Image (cartoon, rainbow, N blue to C red):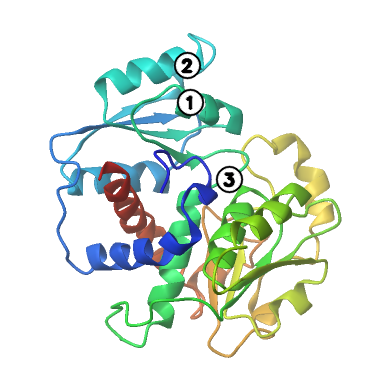
């Protein structure tokens, strides 16, 4: 794969499945000291529970010394130029994990860093979340009740994503289509995954032996029919708070609840990257519904990211 992981497509489609299998191996007890005695800098402009926890502990499990920097400590592009931050960090740390707003900020960091830079979330993509999501899908569909990766592909899955075609949906589109599955996104008018991303997904999988697909539509019921997984995310993300009232109106009818789940396959599983807003994109009970694998999905952030860091360190 590329030196950095700035967008999901920096991971070639034919390398997704091996990375997911390695993540499951690590979860099942495989040991790695790929980052032994190395320093990993976590630079966050946005707060997070799962992202900070999973990268911090995952880096420690790989033998690294993680160091966390809050927005006030770095001030990307404010206290000093982004390029200067990249050069300073790369001169002392062996890897940088960055959670920021603009994708352009991450691109500039990558362009000026000799050390690998990982996208821990931008407004454009959330690629590490997509790795954890597809790892979780592979675990769930495995024939082995212990979760061993006896099934090594997701070529025939159908994933329904209900809600905003946001950064999570964008990265998930690359991941599912890159593995040969189908992602069906149901969004209100004006909230689709951007058109350019649809073209990029098609380009990303052109040379793959099993070609997946991305379908966008308006009807959440039609999107959910025959789905193996039903996924949603918050209607209003960080930085969009001023749009909350309008989004609540626009997304009325797009809530994932037991009634909507009934249109999916009988054994379909419910997914959410969390934190959730019960009463909005999900009903009050959905995180704890028998179909929910949300907490398994949250834990798998750590294992998937460990496999990614191990790969970038090699």
Residue placed at 68% from the left, 60% from the top? 202
Question: Does the residue at mark 1 contact the one at mark 2 (Cβ under 8 Å)?
Answer: yes
- Badge count: 3
Assign the C terminus to one quadrant of the image.
Answer: top left
* Left or right of 185 on screen, residue 291: left
Judged left or right of residue 303, residue 64 is left
Judge whether 36 appears above or below 87 on screen.
below
Whether residue 276 is situated above or below residue 123 in the rendered picture: below
- Decide which of tag 3 and tag 1 comes sooner along the chain: 1
Give the foreground label among 3 and 2.
Answer: 2
Q: Closer to the camera, 293 or 152?
A: 152
Residue occupied by mark 3: 125
Residue 25 in the image: x percent, y percent? 24, 67
Query: Which of 135 and 286 lies nearest the eye of the viewer?
Result: 135
Q: Are marks 3 and 2 in contact (CB under 8 Å)?
A: no
Query: Horizontal and vertical percent for residue 195?
Result: 78, 51
What mark, if any, has residue 34 been given in the picture? none
Q: Secondary structure at mark 2?
A: helix
**Residue 111 position in % (x across, y down):** 48, 25
Q: Estimate how packed mark 2 is, as few (under 14), some (14 to 19) or many (20 or more) residues with alpha carbons within 10 Å.
A: some
Residue 132 vs residue 248, the one in the foreground: 132
**Alpha-carbon span between mark 3 and mark 1:** 18 Å
Above or below, comparing residue 285 to residue 142 in the picture:
above
The residue under label 2 is: 83
Q: In this view, which residue lies farthest toward the front?
A: 207
Which of the numbered marks, if any, corresponds to residue 111? 1
Q: Is residue 165 visible?
A: no
């Amino acid at each position: 794969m590329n030196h950095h992981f700035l967008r999901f497509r920096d991971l070639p489609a034919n390398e997704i499945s091996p990375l997911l299998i390695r993540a499951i191996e690590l979860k099942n007890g495989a040991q790695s000291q790929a980052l032994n005695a190395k320093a990993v800098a976590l630079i966050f402009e946005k707060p997070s529970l799962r992202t900070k926890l999973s990268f911090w502990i995952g880096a420690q499990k790989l033998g690294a010394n993680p160091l966390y920097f809050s927005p006030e400590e770095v001030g990307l592009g404010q206290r000093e130029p982004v390029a200067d931050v990249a050069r300073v960090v790369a001169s002392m740390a062996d890897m940088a994990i960055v959670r920021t707003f603009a994708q352009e900020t991450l691109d500039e960091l990558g362009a000026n860093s000799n050390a690998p830079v990982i996208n821990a979330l931008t407004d454009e993509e959330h690629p590490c979340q997509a790795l954890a999501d597809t790892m979780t899908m592979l675990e769930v569909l495995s024939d082995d009740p212990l979760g061993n990766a006896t099934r090594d592909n997701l070529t025939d899955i159908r994933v329904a994503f209900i809600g905003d075609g946001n950064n999570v949906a964008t990265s998930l589109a690359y991941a599912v289509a890159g593995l040969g599955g189908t992602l069906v996104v149901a969004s209100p008018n004006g909230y689709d995954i951007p058109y350019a991303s649809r073209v990029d997904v098609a380009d990303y999988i052109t040379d793959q032996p099993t070609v997946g697909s991305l379908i966008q539509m308006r009807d959440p019921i039609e999107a959910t029919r025959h789905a193996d997984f039903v996924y949603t995310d918050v209607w209003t993300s960080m930085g969009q708070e001023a749009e909350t009232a309008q989004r609540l109106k626009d997304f009325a009818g797009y809530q994932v609840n037991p009634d909507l789940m009934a249109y999916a396959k009988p054994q379909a599983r419910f997914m959410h990257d969390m934190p959730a807003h019960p009463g909005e994109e999900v009903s009050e009970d959905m995180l704890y519904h028998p179909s929910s694998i949300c907490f398994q999905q949250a834990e798998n952030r750590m294992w998937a990211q460990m496999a990614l860091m191990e790969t970038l360190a090699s």
